[in-house]
Every structure is written in structure tokens, then in C-alpha cells.
Image (cartoon, grey):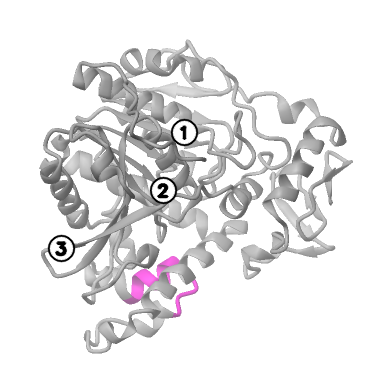
Amino acid sequence: MWLFKYNSSLYLVPRLSYTLYYNDKSGDFLSYDGHMISADHPIMAIVAPNLTTQSLFAKSLKLRQSRVRLPATMATPVAVTGTTADQFIDHHPSLEVLGGACDSFCPIIKTHLDRPYNSFPVFGSNCHLETIFAAFFRKIPDVKLKRECLRTQDDGTVTLDWVSGDARNLPENSPILLLLPGLSGGSQDAYVRHMLVRARNRGWRVVVFNSRGCADSPVTTPQMYSASFLGDLDEVVGHITTRYPKANLYGTGWSMGANILVQYLGKESGARRFSGAVSMCNPFNLVMSDEDICRGFSKIYNRSLGKALGGILKKHLPLFEDIGDEYNIPLAANAETIREYDEGLTRISFGFESVDEYLQKSCSADHIKNVQTPLLCIQARNDPIAPDRAIPREDIKMNPNCLLIVTPKGGHLGWVAGENAPLGCPWTDPMVMDFLQHLENEKSGIQEATNSLLQPLEA
């Protein structure tokens, strides 16, 4: 068990590896075993590699029932501050809800908006703990996927992972949900799999877009992907809509995938092929996001993602041997931060003078005002990677196609809350699916139907 100190009280919680001490003012875990957690300390220092999902779940149930007496401040929803004229007021005060599409979209998901956002005890009490817990301990649904390699116009390769058997079992006009994972992520990630299972079990055809090199996708040219490059997504959208011309296409993106999706919806003519979209944990302003992950405990995420990007590059180094003197491939391959990777490879590949220019010109916040597709944006106020201050609230308020929901907690890709917490799907998934299903019902003019040929997938 962990010994957890909160407001001068001690609580027993499922043990990971160390005793942690909680800072009441900053909301951060400051030390373990009496030592300060430094920026150089790896994420896995605060998670136990030998902890099993089964034991964690069993202990967490006991924790919820009897072992922890949580202070009222940890269970009471946080009321948002701000204006009332521009916010949808018919929702629980723990949520911030605003947007030009409030009148149109809020009734669709009213059952979700009426409920308080209650984080799972302890695991949802701190943004870093929630982010790390969700990344390492959320259950990953076992789904058999069929991979398709798509060759792009520049001879690059991206992969599309479809649910195996759906090509023959689903009608040609079944709605399609395209999933865009976060930076260096792919179809193997728990949050992606949970959304895939939920949509597929409602009769949707689901496909995951893995960027170049991600999820073990092949790399066939000396070019990777970036937050500013929309060409691969445009080719994927064209490929899918050509294969299934009778089906309506929808998109859901997380983190960097959300940033790319929203840029595409606001900039590209191909956006008209989407009938609806959802953006979650979108950094929106990459300059602000870069500022946040370069300080404090968040440096751990910066280092983890930088190493993940460098690891992908290392698998394909022979392709980059003769790429030119301006590139710094050793710097990118051994990157300790995202910025080092971008300095050595990304900014040069995509024609930017500096990393700062690349970040400034890759912000979806600059394009959300032009989005003409129904768009639901969901953010967590305490997200350590996608900062709350980066959300383009004024542009969302002015756009009649956009709705924003901000939860008081959730971390980054966490949202360990709701009836499926702590090991099941994120709190967002039921709301997202209800939103998309309503759009599809209106678009197709028919109500949701079940397909008797489909074998339900287990989450």
C-alpha cells in the first residue's frame, strides 16, 4: 500500500513503489522516500512494474469502500468561474460548457452534462498521478485488428488499423470513425482501444490512423510526421471516402492528433468530407504547451515523449544517413526532449527556420474559428500538457459549429472518473459516442440499428 499524506492526514492506498508526499498548495507530489523528485527522474520511478491490474482493481474497490476517508474538498465538484452570459447554464457546476453550438449540441448530451464530474478517489486527485496511472494501468481491450499500409504521394507510408472481419460483416453505409492518436501513439494505446470498442459495438466501422513510424508502421522515406503537416491525413480521408462512398465519416483525435484534426477541419477543403468530429486534450497552442512541459514535474513528459520520438527514428536510421548537412540526426535520435527532436529533424523536414516558428505555425487555435464541421472539444482544466489558458474560448463562443466542455480534473488523457473508473474507459467516451451517434442519426435520417452479424467486442 501507499502511505498518502493529504491535508496533514494519512491514508492507505494501493501501493505502487514509494511513499509519496502531497503538496497542498501546488497539488503536486514532491518527494518519495524523503527525496525530491527531479526533472531527470523517469516516469516509471513512481509506478511499480510488478503491480498487476487484478490486484490493483481489487485493492481500489476496498479503498473506495472503507479504507480512505476523503476530505470533502476532494469529493466536491469544483465550480467554474467566469461569465454566465456566454456559458450554457443548464449543466452541473463542476463543468465549464460554452460555445456557439450550445443550443444545438447540449441537449444531445444533456444526461452527461447534468451529472457532477467526480474523479476516482486518490487516482484522480492529482493531474500527474492521474496522467501516469491512466497511461500505465488502464485496461487495454484485446481487439484483433487488420492492418493496411497506405503509400502516400511522396512514397511515404502510413498504416490504417481496421477491426478484423468488419469489411465483410458491416454494411457499406455503416458510419466510419477515424481515430487519430496522440504524439508517438497508435492503435496499441488504451484510450484508443476503448473508443474503438465502444463505437464498433454500436455498429460503426472504426479505423485507427497510425502516423509514419508509429505503432510499428514502416518508414519508407527520410521524412516523419509533424504537428503542421496535414498531407497524410488528407490522403487517408480521401482513401477512406473513396472506398466507402455511401458512408458518413467522423473523426476523433487526442492530444497531437486532435491538434492535427482541428487544423485540418479549419484549413483544408477536404474537411467537408467529415460529418462531425471530436477533439480531446488538444494542446491548441503549441507554444504554450512547450512552455508548460519544459518546467516542473512536467519535464518528465517532455523527456518521455522526446525519447519515444527518438526511439522511432533509431529504428530507421539507415534511411537518414545521407539526408544532408543541415539535419542533425544524432541530436534527433538521442533526443532528451521534444524540442531537441524537432531541432534535429522536424523543423528542417518541413521548412521552418526554427523550432519556435514551427510551433507558432502549428497551432489549431488559429483555425478553429473557420471550422464548419460539428465539433465537440473536451479539455481538462488541470491538463499538464494541454494548458487551460491555451483554449481559444472566444473563437469557440463565436463559432456556431463548436462546443467546449472543460472538466475540473482529468490530467492528460486520463479522465479517471465515471462508472468505468479506474481501469475502464475514460469518462469522456460515453459522451463522445452519444454525440457522434446523434449526428449520424440526423445525417442518415435513421435511428441507430444493431447488426446481428457483429460479435460484440469486450472492453
Front position among marks 2 and 1: 1
Q: Residue furthest right?
A: 9
- Relative to 435, does residue 300 appear above or below in the rendering? below
Q: Amino acid at mark 1?
A: Asp
Look at mark 1 in the image and give the residue it sits on: 429
- Relative to 236, does residue 103 appear above or below in the rendering? above
Q: Position of residue 261 (x, y in %)?
A: 28, 44
Give the magenta part as a residue range: 334-344
Look at mark 2 in the image and give the residue it sits on: 255
Q: Residue at x 38, y 33 (%)?
A: 377
Nearer to the camera, 81 or 410: 410
Under tag 2, what secondary structure?
loop
Front position among marks 2 and 3: 3
Give the image quarter of residue 371: top left
Task: Pick whichever of labels 2 and 1 is earlier in the sequence.
Answer: 2
- Relative to 159, does residue 213 appear above or below in the rendering? below
Nearer to the camera, 33 or 204: 204
Q: Amino acid at mark 3?
A: Thr
Give the image quarter of residue 218: bottom left
Q: Position of residue 402 (x, y in %)?
A: 30, 27
Q: Residue at x 75, y 28 (%)?
A: 73
Look at mark 3 in the image and give the residue it sits on: 152
Task: Pick whichever of labels 2 and 3 is earlier in the sequence.
Answer: 3
Q: Residue at x 36, y 76 (%)?
A: 313
How would you rate the neighbour count of disc 3 (Cα within 10 Å): few for under 14, some for 14-19, many for 20 or more? few
Under tag 1, what secondary structure?
helix
Q: Are marks 2 and 1 in contact (CB under 8 Å)?
A: no
In the visual, does 87 lie left or right of 118?
Answer: left
